[in-house]
Image (spheres, grey):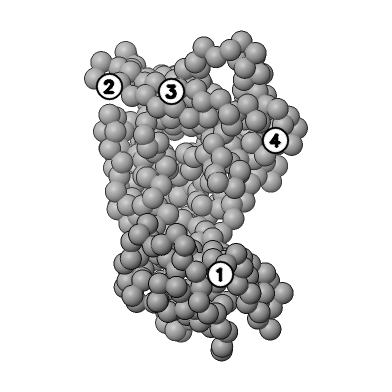
Amino acid sequence: MTYVTPLANRRRLAIDHHGQRGEFAALWLREHSPDAETLDPRTGQRLVEAAELPLSLGIESAEVADGQLCLHFSDGHRTAFDLAALFDDQPSDPPKRLWAAASAPRPDADFCAALADDAALSDMLEALHRDGFVIVSGVPTEADGMQPLIDRIGPLRHTNWGGIADVKSVADAYDLTMTQRGLEPHTDNPYRDPIPGYIWLHCLTNAAEGGDSTLADGFMAALLLRERDPEAYASLTRVTPGFRYRDADTHLESEGPLIELDSHGEPVRVRYSNRTERVPALAPVELETYYAARQAFYRLITGEELTLHLKLDPGQMLIMDNYRLLHGRSAFQLAGGVRHLRQGYVDRDSTASRRRVLRRQLATHQAQGEPA
């Protein structure tokens, strides 16, 4: 059974529907009216100016029939909601699977399959969303071998490095990634706005001694820090350091907390870049708390509890969520051979859009009994 009860001079509506209860503001119901007068049937975009609706708007009548909630508003508008849909406002994305080293997944994909088949591409993107990374095999060992797969998802992000750039040791290196030095776990480019969403790291040759890649799940690190040291967690979500990169032709600056929270108070992005962080001269007490918190986070992301070790083979590519995973590498010696990787960025919005569209299209094909 379903019961509806007007509240607050009919400016709110209480609905009891099969054991679920919700209170909805009349203005919210009015601006979300699912009729063609309010929402464009093709785009789903709103046709009325919500800010011009009267703040005193009320509900003149509310009736339930055949699973529909029929409403008449004080501005004369009439509409009908599907009650099941009204109470089934689920997020469009499935939950992420956080991991430590002992439970780390090894999601993989085949380059040619993802190029040719939407279902294979969808599986790759769902794994990337769920686990934060995926290893793609069979990538042509050519300079821009990853480009055809990028083109299936979204535009390549161009930066001051260019499009797809080399990651190898060079003389007179202008960035530490271009040296043989080991790199601590970090996220890329926190000095940019927006920060690149996904890192594509393609191995051409990896015969040097050392140079193993490391990964750590930053969201798992944040969760463990919250459980083990709430004060440290609060500091890293509160303090906002700056990040800066400069060379002869580039000057980039941005800022943000090491652990950024969403509207529900859950981690939505981690930043960590020892090479580019610029902590402001805060009050000494605040700085002492922050430095201790940063050290606790550092010990988590560098400890064996969370660190996954892997070494890419030629023709393999690692795609990483730059908002979630921290990556690094061990030092390497060129006496053992050449280490040459290529790296590109693809933004978060285009990747998420492609994943959601593929999921919807494949579900539609399945429901209609059509081949994917």
Residue type (three-letter) at the residue carrying disc 4: Arg
Q: Local crowd at mark 2 within 10 Å, few (<14), some, or many (≥20)?
A: few
Q: Which mark is residue 243?
A: 3
- Whole-percent x, y for residue 226 in the image: 70, 35
Query: How many other residues sit within 10 Å of disc 3, few (<14), some (14-19) or many (≥20)?
Result: many
**Residue at the image position 53 percent from the left and 79 percent from the top:** 61
Residue designated by label 2: 250
- Frontmost of labels 4 and 1 is 1
- Tell me the quadrant of the picture where the C terminus can be found: bottom left
Give the residue type at disc 1.
Arg
Neighbour tally class for label 1: few under 14, some 14-19, many 20 plus, Cα within 10 Å: some
Determine whether the residue tagged by mark 1 lies in a helix, strand or loop.
loop
Residue name at image x 33 percent, y 31 percent: 166
Q: Is residue 101 visible?
A: no
Q: Earlier in the sequence, mark 4 or mark 3?
A: 4
Answer few, some or many: residues within 10 Å of disc 4's Cα (few below 14, many 20 plus, some between 14 and 19).
some
Front tag of 2 and 1: 1
